[in-house]
Amino acid sequence: MQQLVDAFSRKFFYLRLSITDVCNFRCTYCLPNGYKPNGHKSFLSLDEISRLTQSFAALGTEKIRLTGGEPTMRRDFTDIIATIKDNASIKKIAVTTNGYRLSRDVAQWRDAGLSAINVSVDSLDPRQFHAITGQDKFSQVMEGIDAAFTAGFEKVKVNVVLMRNVNDKNLPDFLNWIKDRPIQLRFIELMETGDGSDIFNRFHLSGEVIRQRLLNEGWLQIPRARSDGPAQVFTHPDYQGEIGLIMPYEKDFCLTCNRLRVSAIGNLHLCLFGENGIPLRDLLADDSQQQALQQRIQGGLLHKRETHFLHQGDSGITPNLSVIGG
């Protein structure tokens, strides 16, 4: 099997595949005015997704994360999972979701082959959750997380965008929530985007604040597997849950990059920030183009930069957080 390797000897086992740009939440840091269609291009079809993921699997991809927008808004979401699952080389299929359909559909997703779930929950206070997301669905999302465990998932990851003076003071509540639950709670630093400079300047807080509190309270960092995401994960003997920290502004964050992204319209993005993407969709029309598709993916990887430039305030063309795929 071939393996995707860039000019800095980083190997890529992990694909984040956006399957829609549509989202039904209006998070203050992402889409405060709600989703607005941009252009008239259709999203990747089921057949195109099949060919795309087959090529990535042939190039050593072991893990695929389905993202959006809100990926579960696709009516064929379960079929997408099943199609990817048909490829034995893909060892893990994950989704990042706002959780609004979990309680209804998570069992059928698991039956189709879904193996991991990330749910976005920025507050455990229902009123604050409503204020952040624009949706009064806190109870529904909590029921969905319970349903995931009932369906057989041994662990659920919960994403929390860390925001100064919004949820950073609630660490004790979050820790209490995961004390007896196998939840990996992941604090993600708020990132600056083209449309979000004001929000970034107002709410950004370094994850180092959380890390020091964890270390002072006896939490220990554990090593990452090769297809894991960028989180630094901490465990504590008194807690069934874990804490993850994703800190893109930390020095050397990009040294261990192992993931690529394809947008919902079929562009390969070598980094979540900073470039227009390499078109792949013209090579997804039929099975005869698989070799050319793999060559384009490999060739594009040679142009991957060593690092992003977020620390310099450069988010490239990224207008808001919705387009970085969960």
Image (tube, helix red, strand yellow):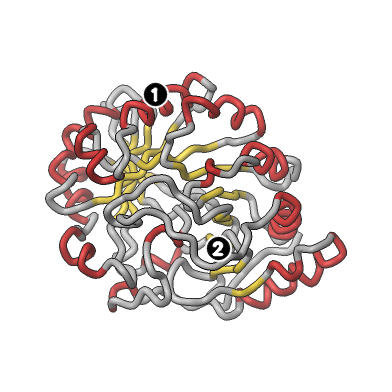
Q: How many marks?
A: 2
Relative to 155, is 239 on the left or the right? left
Rendered residue at 63%/60% (across/down)? 42
What residue sits right under mark 1 in the picture? 143
Give the spatial CA distance, label 2 vs label 1.
32 Å
Rendered residue at 67%/77% (across/down)? 299
x, y (%) of residue 95? 52, 43
Q: Where on the picture, by quarter, is residue 246? A: bottom left
Rendered residue at 38%/46% (across/down)? 25
Return the residue found at the far right.
288
Relative to 208, is 44 on the left or the right? right
Relative to 83, is 322 on the left or the right? left
Task: Report the disc number at residue 105.
Answer: none
Q: 81 and 60: which one is in front? A: 81
What residue sits right under mark 2 in the picture? 260
- The three-letter amino acid code for the residue at tag 1 is Glu
Estimate how packed mark 1 is, as few (under 14), some (14 to 19) or many (20 or more) residues with alpha carbons within 10 Å: some
x, y (%) of residue 316? 40, 77
Say what secondary structure mark 2 lies in.
strand
Estimate how packed mark 2 is, as few (under 14), some (14 to 19) or many (20 or more) residues with alpha carbons within 10 Å: many
> Is 91 above or below relative to 199?
above
